[in-house]
Image (cartoon, helix red, strand yellow):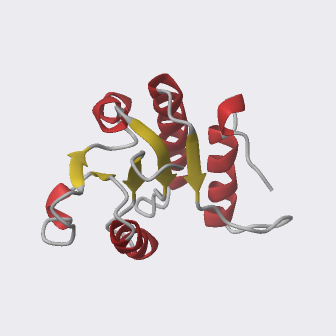
Amino acid sequence: MKPNERILLTGATGYVGGRLLRALESFGQPLRCLARSPERLQGRVVSSTEIVTGDCLNADSLKVAMVGIHTAYYLVHSMGDAASFEEKDKQAALNFARAAEAAGIQRIIYLGGLGEGLLSPHLRSRQDCARQKSRSSNFAPRS
């Protein structure tokens, strides 16, 4: 990736995303953060970092965030409602992958979970999300 290519970061209010946010900003990489609650990022980003309101469960809200993006980090995970988080995770991942493909994003970097066999619902959901993103040949997982 070239230094002037803009990155989209999701999950910047979380533990991993917050640390990645600081690292990307320290490299001077043009950065846009997608957040359901953008006020949670106020005061935590440098002035050159854009904050865009959006929700991966609302496909239309992703369009503006993805304009002009080269690479997107997908660090979204539904931890809320225990009864439906797996379906929400799957739908959010599918919405994101479709919007990224429509916007011409070159790469999605996804933080999933390792494991096989009998998995917890959360690890199983992480792997299902990876499969949603890889439905497009542009976003096939790499080993």
Q: Quadrant of residue 29?
A: bottom left
Q: Residue at x 63, y 58 (%)?
A: 126
Which corner quadrant of the image does residue 122 belong to? bottom right
Between 85 and 60, the residue placed more toward the observer is: 60
Q: Residue at x 41, y 39 (%)?
A: 69
Above or below: residue 55 compared with residue 117:
above
Query: Is residue 84 in sight in this rendering?
Result: no
**Along the viewing direction, whichever of 81 and 53 lies nearer the viewer:** 53
Query: At which x and y percent is residue 140?
Result: 73, 40
Give the answer, above or below, for where 127 lies relative to 120.
Answer: above
**In this view of the protein, can residue 17 be seen by the observer?**
yes
- Which of these two is toward me, 59 or 44? 44
Residue 30 pos. (x, y %): 33, 53
Q: Residue at x 76, y 51 (%)?
A: 142
Say how many tags the image has. Answer: 0
Question: Which residue ends up furthest to the right in the rendered image?
Answer: 117
Relative to 102, does residue 114 appear above or below in the rendering? below
Q: Residue at x 26, y 51 (%)?
A: 36
Q: Quadrant of the C terminus?
A: bottom right
The quadrant in which residue 14 appears is: bottom left
Extreme front residue here? 3
Direction from residue 64 to residue 128 in the image, left or right: right
